[in-house]
Amino acid sequence: MDRPRTTRARYAGPRATFGVVCLALTLSFAGACARPAAVREADDITFALTGNTLPESPFGTMSPRVADAFARINIDNPVFTVHLGNMVYGGRQWMGIKESDVARQYREFVAACRAIHSIVYTVKGDKDTYNDNADLYRKHLRRAPYYSFNYGSVHFIILDTTDPGPGTISPFQRSWLEADLERYRHSPAIFVFAHHSLLPPKHETSTPVQGAAEILSLLAKYPVKAVFSGQPAISHTARSGDILCVTAGSGGFNRDDQYRRKNHYYMVYFSAGSVRVSERQAN
C-alpha cells in the first residue's frame, strides 16, 4: 500500500516561500509584499469510492466479486480510490476469532488492492479492528487511523469514526481535525471521508456519529465541498448547508440477491467547483 503524504504527525504540501522572498526584496518593493496571494483554483479530479468488502465471516475468504469490482474501477481510471471501511471481518478473542484470522484477511485485502491501478486510501471501519485496537490495520495497510493528504491543490481528510468506539471521534482527533482544517483553510476545496455518516437518512437504522452536528458546523467554516461515508450500506445524498453529504454504501459482495441490486463502487467527478457522484455496479 502507498503511504499517504500526510499523517497525524506531518502534513503534505510544500511550505510557502512567499514570506522569505519578501524579506529579500528591497524597501521599494515592500508594498508588493503586503499584497495577498492570488486565490488558487481547484484542480479537476476524479476518484472512486468503495467499501464493505469484508468476507461473510472472520473465517471465510474475500468474495471473488471484489476482484470484479476492482477491475471495473480500473476501467473508470480514477486518480485514486478510497475504501470507506470494513475491509476485513474483525472481532475479539473471546468470540473465538484469532489474530491470525484477521491478519490473513488483511493480507488478502492488500493483495486484492494491488490489482487497482490507482493509489488506494483507506478509512477504518468498525469491523477493521481486533480486540478493539487498530494494530493490524496499521501494520498491514501502513496507514494511521486518521490522516490527510493533498492531490494537486485539493485537500483530503480521512476521519476515524470508530475512535474509540463505533460512531465516535475522540477529543484528541477532534483537535487534530481543527488544526488540519486551519492549516489548509486557503485550499480551494476540501473533501472529508468517514466510515459512519455524519448526516444519515432518517429512515435508516445506523450508528449515529456522536456530535455530528458540531462537526458539520466546524467543517462549514472551511472550504469543505463534500463529506463521503460508507455506512449505512445504501446510496443517499443530503446537504448540510453548502456541504454535500454522500452516503456511498457498497455491499452485496457475499450474496447473490444483494449483488444484483447494490452498488459496488462510486465515481466522484469534481470539476469547476461542482461535485457529481455516479453509482456503479460490477455485474
Image (cartoon, rainbow, N blue to C red):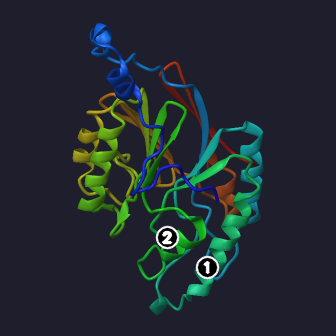
Q: CA distance from mark 1 to mark 2?
A: 13 Å
User: Residue at point 39% right, 36% down?
Assistant: 238
Where is residue 31? Give x, y as percent. 27, 9
Q: Quadrant of residue 52?
A: bottom right
Quarter of the image where one finds residue 271: top right
Check disc 2 and report its element: helix, strand or loop. Answer: loop
* Label 1 secondary element: helix
The disc placed on residue 103 is 1
Residue named by callout 2? 127
Q: Is residue 46 toward the left or the right of residue 245 in the image?
A: right
Residue at 67% of width from left, 38% of height from top? 78
* Residue 255 falls left or right of residue 16: right
Front one among 178 and 67: 178
Lower position in the chain sequence, tag 1 or tag 2? 1
Looking at numbered disc 1 in the image, what kind of residue is underneath it?
A: Ala
Q: Residue at x 41, y 31 (%)?
A: 16
| Near-viewer residue (99 or 9) | 9
Relative to 220, does residue 195 appear above or below in the rendering? below
Q: Nearer the viewer, residue 232 or 171?
A: 171
Vertical comparison of 57 with 120: above or below: below
Counting from the top left corner in percent of width and height, residue 221 is at: 26, 33
Given the current orientation, which residue lies at the most extreme front position?
Answer: 26
Query: Which mark, by number, is residue 198?
Result: none
Q: Is residue 221 left or right of residue 51?
A: left
- Residue 56 as seen in the image, left or right of residue 172: right
